[in-house]
Amino acid sequence: MARGCGCRVQRLGRTFPVNRVISWFATNHVAANLVMALAILAGLVSIVRIPFKLVPDMDVPIVTVSVPYLGAAPAEVESGVCARLEEQLEGIEGIRELRSVAAEGRCSIEVEFFYDVDRLRALGEVDSRVNAIHTLPIETEKPIVELAQVTDLVLEVAVTGPEDERALKELGRRVRDDIRRLPGVTEAWVLNERPYEIAVEVSEASLSRYRLSFDDIASALRKRSLDLPGGAVKTEQGELLLRSSGQAYWGDELKNLPVTSRADGTRVLLKDVAEVVDGFAETVQGLRFDGRPAALVRVARVGNQDAGQISETVKRYVAEAPSYLPAGTELAIWRDQSARLAIRLATLLDSGLQGLLLVLILLALFLRPHVALWVGAGIPIAFLGAIFLIYAFGFSMDATSLMGFILAIGMLVDDAVVVGESVYVSHRQGAGQLAGAIEGAQRVLLPVTFGVLTTVVAFLPLLFGEGRIGVIFGVMASTVICCVIASLIECMTVLPAHLGHRSTRLPLGEFGLILLAIVIVASLALAPSLRVGAALAVAAGALLWALHMTGWLNKLGARFTRGQVRFESALAWFVANPFRRLAERALRNRALALAAGFVVLVLAAATVYSGHVPYSFTMPTKGDSIVARLTMPLGSSETATAAVVDRLASTAWEVRAQVTAEHEQPVVEHIVETIGAHPAAGIRLGFGRDRAAAHLGGVTMQLTPSEGRGITTNEVAARWRDINGPVPSDVRLVFLTDRVAQMPGIDIRLTGSDPASLGRAVAAVRRELATYPGVYQIADTFRIGKEELQLAVTPAGEALGLTLAEVGRQVRQAFYGEEVQRVQRGRDDVRIMLRYPAADRRSLASLDSLRIRTSAGGEVPFRTVADVTHGRGLADIERVDGGRTVNVTAETDRTVTTPDAVLRQLDRGFLA
């Protein structure tokens, strides 16, 4: 006999140990309430303590190798560095893919290993192989070998104010140091700073006047600007150190160093021969924030740091504004990616509330209000229990795990509905309150348990996936598994106890409580904001209380009960007649029923595969920013790129004025112009810093949050694109609105060794893509490089004993420069570069006037000893597993087609 019920509990089938657990918790409702309280408390504590991230941690087994080869063309970098490194690295066990990029002045290699390879062992193997190479060009610098560090952007702080670049750089550094000292922040750096450099600029006329060469000046500076330890003198009084101290760290100190002597013995100082400029390296790093020069301090999350806490900490620092900031200097938050996590949390909350609302309405319509209440309450309890399990197993919360929660909502509802409906059936069959709860829960114990186990088994393989996609699916799968396990525990311990004990002293009665729950959930789920929803819920609660006090609530409850009886009768008739006859016929004709089901399955798959139902593995996530990425023809000057960026910025300000006037509220928060690099757009920071180049640029438009804005991000982007107008065919301009990583929807990789054949293949693929409706922004990575002047030594030069290496070295000294020294000035590594003045390096006439020094001490005109031919090479040369590759990318209008549909058609036709 079950205690407190006055009736016998019917045992169905074989008794399982879990049945006794269900019976014990149902009869001991205090224990069930304790389990519920512990789940709620543990979940709330876990929410506070669990780290929140934007994306899951990926300990990718990728080793990067970077070799600077300053001044070299991509073809020279490919043949002299990348190809030799690839040959040396081939054969290392466990390599999945070997990727390299030969760019102007640098070779970058990514060695990706399989996920089961130990990262430290892979790093050691690659490092030993690279250090064993002794055939790299002498002009290359020491290779940098390191593990790929994938960091997640949290936000950026814009420092605006000083027009002077040096003052802005130092101010940005000071803000960066402040941010690094904030609790919980470890990763911050200034994004757009140029390194310091001392340029010693000597004209050809000055060299001839003083009968000097670049080698003479470089040798004189190295001999006179140095600190040299001289050992020690051990006297009877003690030991005295000997030290020569003459290192020059600043441009003014270099100016007064002697470089030669005249016939009368007077010294010729460096300032007499050259102009010394203590400034910045000749790289392009321009950035303007709302029209003012700015330094961007990027803050990222590493390890188990909480992105939300980092964001709040930095925001408080910006709001308080350090006292040392000069007048007119402002700090502003830019690209706060923690808002993305808040959006996912809001989506999860909305989905949960909508699911709960649907459950409450349907269960109240079909079952008793008492059952509907506790089934609905089980959803948040199961969620909190799942969060505790996630924390206990050492997982974190990120955007991917939140998607897992959204996916699991339906599964949680299913378990609770099955148990609640089974208990309701037992009560209708005459079982007592407690006995019916126990009997109903035990009846569906096996199907519910095996349903959960089936879900676990279905998601379990995803935990062992490889690669970055494998990590993402693994996080989602672990979240779903934790949810269904927590739901099973709640359904078999807490829910039967609540359904087995029914209180008769409820403030509003069962109907009033279920109606109040539906109104509260509906207010929170459908209101435009949480504040409005809470206000509506309070008002609805007050109205229901007033109806209860006047007796109207009881009358409404009676009418609802009569309507529920009629609806239930109609449903019972449908089940007992049409549905029963259909089920009996299906059982008598099993083969026909199975065939019909199989046909429906095939038709459903065919509609997807044929493209009638659009399908895409990844759907775009619309953000609150628009990024216009500009790529000018290679070789374009900073001035030419700046002119196009200025045009983009002016049209962005025009769009801002239009949409603000139309909607009578701010729509665009900030506008940022970038020259020398593409503006960042995604949340994931890759394996290095952005590469600077004069032909790159862009403008970013940050919009206000989408809630209440009145215009979508795509609509603003379309207006901006229309106002800006078309660009020349050799200029690439792409507008991006996707929040995630701005990965192209269509990405086709072509591999080959002949550049001409690759170029023809790229053109063919582009033409084919252009024929597909809905495909736009077609682009490729095959780009002709800068125009080149290729040198060769003439017979006259060879007769003078000159070689191509010697002529090339002297030309490099004049136009690229020779690194005389590298000094440590504070925390800066400062190069001292010797070369022609900037004005001379911008004119081909300077090449004609260049004098080549021979080994005999003579000087000859450059044109006498060298021939010059014009040519063009490639831009960045991408290689995969030793072969050159080119990618063709495109975007699709998803109202017309999807990337998957286009790729399927290409595979069946053009690429077959």
Image (cartoon, helix red, strand yellow):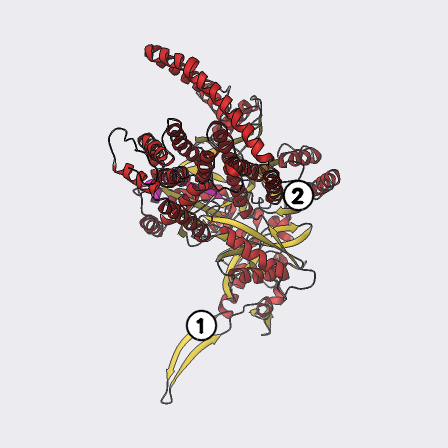
* Residue kind at label 1, given as amino acid type: Leu
Q: Position of residue 597 (x, y in %)?
A: 39, 16
Secondary structure of residue under mark 2:
helix
Magenta highlight on residue 95 = yes
Discs 2/1, front: 2
Crowding around mark 1 (Cα neighbors within 10 Å: few <14, some 14 to 19, many 20+) is few
Q: Is residue 368 above or below residue 807?
A: above
Q: Which residue is mark 2?
A: 645
Q: What's the residue at 53%, 24% (across, down)?
A: 563
* Residue kind at label 2, given as amino acid type: Val
Question: Where, quadrant-wise, is the C terminus in this rendering?
Answer: top left
Q: Position of residue 649 (x, y in %)?
A: 68, 43
Which residue is nearer to you in this view: 489 or 732? 489
Question: Residue 699 got which mark?
Answer: none
Q: How many marks?
A: 2
Q: Position of residue 140 (x, y in %)?
A: 44, 52
Q: What's the residue at 46%, 45% (across, down)?
A: 398
Which residue is nearer to you in this view: 908 or 76? 908
Distance CA(mark 2)–CA(mark 1): 49 Å
Q: Is residue 871 visible?
A: no
Q: Which residue is mark 1?
A: 228
Magenta stretch bounds: 86-103
